[in-house]
Every structure is written in C-alpha cells, then in structure tokens.
Image: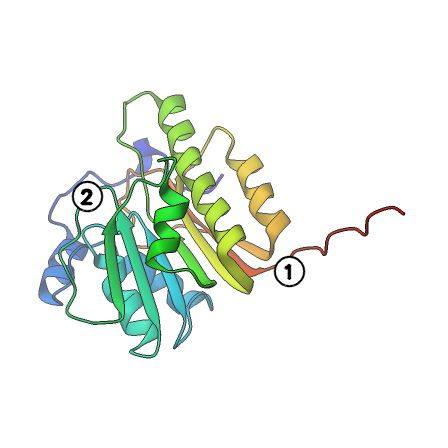
Amino acid sequence: MVGTPPTMGKPYRPKDHYFQKAKQEGLRARSAFKVDEILRRFPVVKKGGVVLDLGAAPGGFLQILADTVGLSGRVIGVDIVAIRPFPQKHVTTAVLDVLADDFDARLRALYEGPLDAVISDMAPKTSGIKATDEARSLRLAGKALEVAVERGRPGSSFVAKLFMGGDFEAFRDQVRASYDEVKVVRPEATRGASMEVYLVGLRLKAAAPPSAAAP
C-alpha cells in the first residue's frame, strides 16, 4: 500500500518548510512543489502543449504548468471557486463545477481542441468518514479520467490526486486500460499525515476504430 499511515506521519504544520519556500518563490500554494516534482520525474507536459488543470485554485499548479508549456502552449485552469487572474495570455481560468451537467459543454466553450495533458488536484470536502471521503475522491478522479480519455490526443498524459483505500485498485486498473504506463506517486511535499497519492498515466492509447457494420 502506497502512502504513510496517519499514525506514522509528521504532525500537521500549516506553515512548514514547503509553505515558507512557496512564499519565498512567489508561488500561490505549497502544492506547486507536488506538480513540479511530478513533471521533473515524468514526461507529462511538454513545451508548447495544451494542459487542463482541474481543481486549479488558488493557482500553484497553474504557475508551474504555465512556465513548463511556455508562451507557445496553453493552460486552462478551472475550479468551483474563482482563481485570481494570471498576467500570462496563455493561461485561461474559469469557475466551473466538474460534476455539473453542463460541464463538458462549458469546457468546450473555453477550449475545443485536443489536450496534451489533464491534471487534477481536485479533492472533496472531507467528512471525516473514511469510506465516504474515499468514494468522493474517486468520483472526482473518475470525472477527470473521463475528460482525459475523451479530450486527450493519443500519447497524452493524465495526473489525478486521490485518497488511498476503497476502490483505489479498481480505479488504477481503469487508468491502465487507457494508458500505456501508470505510476503511483507520493510527492515529497505531501503532508506527512495525508493519505493522498497521485496516479500518473503516460501515453494515452489510441481509440480502437469502430467495427465495420455487418452487411
């Protein structure tokens, strides 16, 4: 089982090393170091790519992604809360609920083309009930995977945060069915007591051609 059990983790410290480092480097959130590590370890995002960031507020991931794709790329960040605007013209943000019925249509209105990567840092409001929180986390990750498979170009990447436990293994199998390679990552910046991990899917498989209709 990947992840550090809460009883073995370090105590929660709101202003820990990564918080201070983020402040010093002008990053909007300490979580920026999580995606930075993932991008350094795996070929998820390339210069000139188009990336969708789900659960993007307050914008820590977006800062790293915007620098990675460069001015020739594009980053779209969405969340259920407003994200402070970015000065870079290749960064677009919007308030969207991924579980709303009109989400797919509204996302296409923002960007209609294929995506090179879908990265989700979405997390549910925790209830304190382990099974409930795991199920909610998987629901959000499942929606992110749906978007990644439907909108991603062949060879594109997928990253999603979720809580370990419950149906984690079944969800990993779903990702494996769509991507050539799947990794489970616990970035160093993850808080010690957290049970969150990131699933990284590399190289989206090309969709199988439709079968020919019987004569």
Residue that extends furthest to the right in the rendered view of this protein? 215
Comparing 157 with 49, the one in front is 49
Other residues around mark 1 within 10 Å, as few (<14) / some (14–19) / many (≥20): some
Spot occupied by residue 38 in the image (x, y as percentages of width and height) = 39, 61
Q: How is the image coloured?
A: rainbow
Q: Is residue 127 above or below residue 101?
A: above
Whole-angstrom CA distance, mark 2 to mark 1, is 34 Å
Query: Residue 193's quadrant in the figure?
Result: top left
Comparing 188 with 100, the one in front is 100
Q: Going 35% across and 35% down the picture, which residue do you hit? A: 100
Q: Going 13% across and 67% down the picture, which residue do you hit? A: 25
Q: Going 39% across and 47% down the picture, which residue do you hit? A: 105
Instruction: Report if residue 136 is visible in the image.
Output: yes
- Where disc 2 sits, the SS reads loop
- Where disc 1 sits, the SS reads loop
Amino acid carrying mark 2 in the image: Val
Which residue is identified by label 1? 206
Amino acid carrying mark 1 in the image: Ala
Spot occupied by residue 140 in the image (x, y as percentages of width and height) = 39, 38
Query: Residue 129's quadrant in the figure?
Result: top left
Other residues around mark 2 within 10 Å, as few (<14) / some (14–19) / many (≥20): some
Query: Residue 97's quadrant in the figure?
Result: top left
Q: How many marks?
A: 2
Spot occupied by residue 41 in the image (x, y as percentages of width and height) = 43, 66
Mark number, residue 81: 2
Mark number, residue 192: none
Reading the chain from its start, which is encountered first: label 2 or label 1?
A: 2
Spot occupied by residue 128 in the image (x, y as percentages of width and height) = 28, 22
Whether label 2 touches label 1, CB < 8 Å: no
Q: Going 57% across and 35% down the picture, which residue do you hit? A: 170
